[in-house]
Amino acid sequence: MKILVIGGGGREHAIIWRLKLDNPDHRISCVTTNAGINELADSKPLVSYNRSAADLIIIGPETPLVNGTVNVLLNFGFSVFGPTKAVAQIEGSKIFCKSLLTKNNIPTAKLLFQTNNPEDAFRYLKDQAKFPLVIKADQLAAGKGVYIVDNLPQANKAIKEIMIDKKHGDNAGDSILMEEFLTGQECSLQIITDGETIVPLYPARDYKRLLDGDRGPNTGGMGSYSPLADVPDSLVRLILQTIIMPTLNNLNKIETYVGVLYAGLILTKNGPKVLEYNCRFGDPEAQVVLPLFAGNFTEILQAACEGELKKIKPIWYHRSAVCVVLASKGYPNNYKTGYCITGLDPTIEDTLLFHAGTVLSDGEIKTAGGRVLNIVGIGSDLATARTNAYKRLFKISFEGSIHRQDIAQS
Ligand code: AMP
Ligand code: GLY
């Protein structure tokens, strides 16, 4: 099969690796690449594709989905895995998402205030706010548009950064919402859907903060693991019934939702509640969930595009996976790139290596981004998977590399 994967990070490397595992003869191409994807897929500009050049197109990142790339490709007659623009707004606009959830009594953090006017936001904070509370930029902000604030000066600073300084871009800063601060363990539950049938994937947990002990700034994700002992099948069923199915049914009223629907949840003492929805595979959740999927992954994605998911029986390995991210010193702020990476070759049993920000340059693999490599360990239990991931990680080095040491630690 000829498959085009859009996106060139760790998640897309994991997707391409998993497709190739189904069938080494798949001809996979990509638009953006890295030193890992490079070995599995040809890189060509998007404009060079005509209908016969790809039997299936898979879109990894949120930006093209939210901007309507699926609509354009569908118009050209391609078979595309990913939601259309109207329903990708479940990730593209936090206000759209909150309104859909609230209107339909789907459990989520309570909305306290929303506005497109910074003066109104400052006034609400001064007159009515109770802390801590959570302030979110409405539109995509590369995972950095969420502020948990403990007092008025912090809250005012957040509003200034988002709405006045437009730190996350003009669109992201147009509107904000404020919601109640919730506590509990977080979990990500992703499903694949053709709009009718759903295939739930194993639950996963990601680590968004930079430093051990969940301290430091938020990042795109410093690690992940799957499955989760504290999210048994009974809880998955509850989340599907009370959260994901009602969300999907309401999205389908707007337009049929095809692709991955990712619920970012918090397990509060009053039950699971939605923190966010994403319209794509999580990164780095895909890196731990896809290696545990034992069935034919290509077939599932194809069936989702063709409205045939009901014919598929997903099969899973009863194993665990842990992903640790090796990042560049300075990430998620400023960092240097171009450092040679050593120790990539010697593979260790029950480990996988997915490239994120790497490049092949002058015959050497070098760092080219903030998050550089995703090292995955697999095992019969979580502790073994964790040991395997770190064993492989300690073989790899580049100048200024940083990582968390407490991923999947019990
Ligand atoms: P989001 O992008 O909306 O998932 O937010 C990023 C992170 O901010 C989440 O993974 C949580 O750790 C935290 N967060 C977001 N909303 C809330 C909330 N209402 N209460 C507590 N933490 C939150
Ligand atoms: N790991 C969180 C995300 O993909 O947005």
Image (cartoon, rainbow, N blue to C red):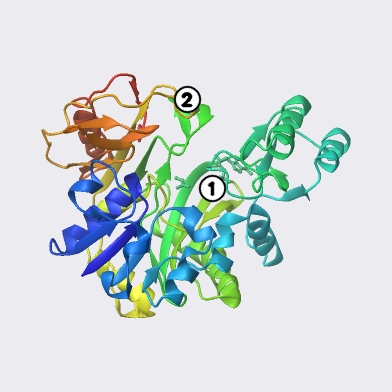
Residue 136 versus residue 184: which sits nearer the camera?
Answer: 136
Amino acid type, label 1: Leu
What residue would you read off at disc 1?
267
**Crowd band around label 2 with a 10 angstrom C-alpha radius: few (<14), some (14–19), many (20+):** few
Disc 1, SS: strand
Is any atom of residue 7 visible in this view? Answer: yes
Disc 2, SS: loop
Q: Is residue 214 above or below residue 293?
A: above
| Residue that sits furthest to the front in the current view | 48
Residue 14 versus residue 68: which sits nearer the camera?
Answer: 68
Q: Is residue 80 above or below residue 403?
A: below
Q: Position of residue 367 (x, y in %)?
A: 30, 30
Task: Tell whether circle 2 marks a residue whose Cβ is less than 8 angstroms from ligand 1.
Answer: no
What residue would you read off at disc 2?
334
Q: Position of residue 299 (x, y in %)?
A: 26, 71
Circle 1 or circle 2, nearest the eye:
2
Q: Is residue 266 above or below residue 91?
A: above
What is the quadrant of residue 309 in the picture? Answer: bottom left
Is any atom of residue 292 visible in this view? Answer: no
Instruction: Tell me the quarter of the image containing the C terminus.
Output: top left
Residue in the image at 40% along x and 32% along y: 370
Q: Is residue 155 left or right of residue 262?
A: right
Q: Is residue 377 above or below residue 302?
A: above
Amino acid type, label 2: Asn
